[in-house]
Amino acid sequence: MLYIYRASHRQENRPRKRRVRDRALQEHGKQLSCRGRAGAGCLMPSGSFWCSPRGVEGINPELKLCLHLRETSSEQPEHCGAPPEDTPRTLELENNLLLSLASVWQSFYLLRTQTGRQAVTGERGVIPAARAQGRLVGGGRESAATHSFFDSRQRERSLPHQHMSTEPSLERDLDGLGKQATDGHTRLTDISGGTEGGSMASIPEYYASKNVLITGATGFMGKVLVEKLLRACPEVKALYLLVRPKAGQSMEERVSDMMTCKLFDRVREDNPDFHQKIIPISSELTQPGLAISPEDVETLSACINVVFHCAATIRFDEPLKHALQLNVIATQQLLGLAKQMHHLEAFVHISTAYANCNRKHIDEVIYPPPVEPKKLIDSLEWMDDSIVRDITPRLIGDRPNTYTYTKALAECVVQQEQDKLNIAIIRPSIVGASWQEPVPGWIDNFNGPSGVFIAAGKGILRTMRANNDAVADLIPVDMVINLTLAAGWYTAVHRPKSALVYNCTTGGINPFHWGQIEHHVMSSFKRNPLEQAFRRPNANITSNYLMNQYWILVSHKFPALIYDFVLRLSGQKPQMMRIFNRLHKAIGLLEYFSSQDWEWNSENMSMLMSQLTPEDRRTFNFDVRQLNWPEYIENYCIGTKKYVLNEDMSDIPAARQHLRKLRNIRYTFNTVLVVFIWRVFIARSQMARNIWRRRQPWPLAVSRMQHLRL
Ligand SMILES: CCCCCCCCCCCCCCCC(=O)SCCNC(=O)CCNC(=O)[C@H](O)C(C)(C)COP(=O)(O)OP(=O)(O)OC[C@H]1O[C@@H](n2cnc3c(N)ncnc32)[C@H](O)[C@@H]1OP(=O)(O)O
Ligand SMILES: NC(=O)C1=CN([C@@H]2O[C@H](COP(=O)(O)OP(=O)(O)OC[C@H]3O[C@@H](n4cnc5c(N)ncnc54)[C@H](OP(=O)(O)O)[C@@H]3O)[C@@H](O)[C@H]2O)C=CC1
């Protein structure tokens, strides 16, 4: 229950405001300890929250959902209503603080108590009852907007709502404070629903009998998405996958290969015939019309309900023209195809949290693009590749690579279609191995930190430039996919007015730092070593450029030279220097991300979580607070061993033995080196001997002791 009192900051209104608050407190509550001119909020034992309309303005929809405006005093009606239009930004921030606290409190309450869960799911009928009795007054501006938008959207489109019942839904009427911006600024908006259903379909219920189109299904995240959809939403009708033939394999062969991989073991157990639901469609996204045949276009237009667009080039060094082709133009073409789909309910675009990495604080809004995408596409079309290469640094400006640059442009392209489609944009940060599903630690590539972990585990990587204290915004792939599926559901069911952006990150909620990652990766690889390690795992990260260069020389280049020399002597091809050069190129591209901090606002992620039923919250868990980092990193490292390098866990004792051997070699080497230095610099030089004796009295002491013993 939410009590609202119009908080006036005018002096003469203060006593009255205080009176109402005191009464609410006396009757029900406990005051939230937060400061700010927005006024204090009171959290009631029942889970309701008392605050000013200023608070309501920025209120988290999970609270909004529980909105039940009630008279709190006789003066209340005249003080109840929309917040002033001129709410300054500082006040909004204060409100956000207040509401974040309330939101945390509320989430805690909801998790802990049955009453709270019922309050949110409306199971006890408080909200419908309030509606029926006409006691509910929407929070002024937002509510009015919600209704008008809702009505106009309903008129504009007559999309199917078979997943909804026909009961009026108060939750959805009240729901409605997602943040949007078309102009780079956060503003309030309403999240209106496209249906008037009272009982919300759960996620698996929603996806039941739906046709889903997925791009990038053969990639890291795409595979996990396909697996999870098949496993958690077994009633899904069909998954259409846009796949290209590659490396001599037809698209059918690639898809059937994919389905035999370990990732699909659990689905296979549950439903051995799951492959029948998968329909590969031949498509090369860089070609005109996505190279989809006219028959396939017709099929897709007729049946697709939800699109997940995961395909992209994620290489940081991709030439701009190609990155633009795939990340922007292909997205544009897919949106064009989506507009032809008669039954499309949601279009989910996977972006990256680093699309706006030129900013330090990133809200869940689509920022103005660095350049108008269409203009860039037109200009690059006629340009020679060499010219494009020359002007790329100027074009990407303060972004580190063509990947983040083109992902930012893609968001803009997606935004341009938000009036015609129901769109969600997911922005994951650094996607890592799975946390729990389908197995802990599942990963299948060298991208991002995985390659670095492996190189460190193999003992090749000894140093890297990173900031020990910077937040390592890793997020497990299963959490990203759970959020993606939930966002697809929410978008289809609620039909936000404009594209909702979900920053899918961990740093703001459950931060972990690169220094801690280094420590846990090293200790994990010592417990579970990789086979045939080059040296014992012992990497250090430093933010100091010179220090890093020194260690590169001493710990990378020098051993590589010795190793290659030995290989050459034994008649083999030298290879270590080549490996190090590639490694340096890779880590050079990653340093930008490991050396600084970003702050992402992830309110929409919390909002989405609050909209799920308890069951969905368990099945599609993306609550990053539950991540236990040391455990996750341990599973991640084991995952790289098992699933990327295909090493057998039963070989661990042998691998440990190998590490012990390497340690003994190192001890021997160090001892020999010390003796050698001693011989060269001490024993042979009178001056060095004199210095040594003066500085280090212990050899004298030792010799005296020996003399005494004799
Ligand atoms: C204990 C320490 C803790 C500190 C730890 C800090 C980690 C700090 C991570 C920040 C991460 C930000 C991530 C942003 C999050 C996104 O938004 S997007 C997703 C991330 N995208 C990527 O990671 C793509 C980066 N990769 C690339 O751009 C290209 O693979 C590279 C690195 C330029 C190499 O291209 P290439 O030379 O054409 O060759 P490619 O065939 O791709 O790979 C060549 C070799 O490099 C290796 N390699 C590829 N990627 C990597 C890698 N990440 N690492 C090492 N080796 C790699 C491959 O294994 C391969 O080795 P071989 O198998 O041939 O022996
Ligand atoms: N991995 C990460 O850390 C992060 C990823 N993201 C985003 O998530 C999404 C998925 O990333 P991820 O799964 O890691 O990437 P992958 O590189 O693993 O997968 C990319 C997918 O796109 C497909 N694809 C690429 N080019 C074409 C083409 N020309 N025609 C058809 N399909 C093509 C690939 O197909 P094929 O197998 O044929 O090459 C593959 O299925 C991307 O949009 C990325 O920007 C965002 C943040 C972090």
Image (cartoon, helix red, strand yellow):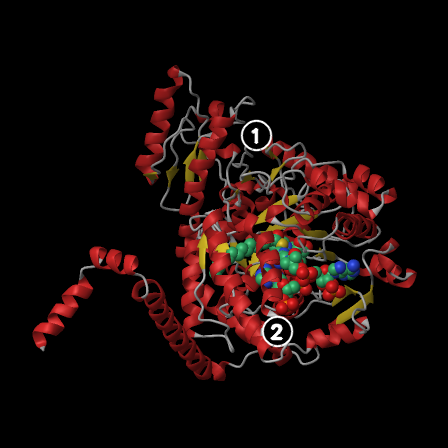
Residue drawn at (30%, 63%) of the image: 682
Locate the N terminus and report the quarter of the image it occupies.
top left
Q: Which residue is mark 1?
A: 140
Q: In which quarter of the view is residue 282 placed?
A: bottom right
Question: Which amino acid lies under the numbered mark 1 shown in the image of this protein?
Answer: Gly
* Label disc, if present, on residue 542 of the rendered structure: none
Q: Are marks 2 and 1 in contact (CB under 8 Å)?
A: no
Q: Residue furthest front?
A: 686
Where is residue 441 drawn, in percent x and y? 52, 69
Where is residue 466 drawn, in percent x and y? 49, 51
Residue drawn at (61%, 32%) of the image: 185
Earlier in the chain: of badge 2 and badge 1, it is 1
Where is residue 700 drawn, in percent x and y? 16, 64
Residue drawn at (58%, 42%) of the image: 175
Q: Toward the viewer: 392 or 63? A: 392
Under tag 2, what secondary structure?
helix
Q: Toward the viewer: 65 or 328? A: 328
Q: Would residue 617 be visible to someone looking at this image?
A: yes
On the picture, is 245 further left or further right than 85? right
Disc tally is 2
From this view, report whether residue 32 is shown above or below residue 443: above
Q: Residue furthest top?
A: 12
Disc 2: CA contacts within 10 A as few (<14), some (14-19) or many (>=20): many
Distance in Å between CA atoms under marks 2 and 1: 49 Å
Where is residue 32 drawn, in percent x and y? 35, 38
Q: Foreground mark, 2 or 1?
A: 2
Q: Toward the viewer: 74 or 647? A: 647
Q: Toward the viewer: 380 or 150? A: 380
From this view, report whether residue 132 is shown above or below residue 665: above
Q: Which residue is mark 2?
A: 263
Q: Within 8 Å of ligand 2, the CB of disc 2? A: no
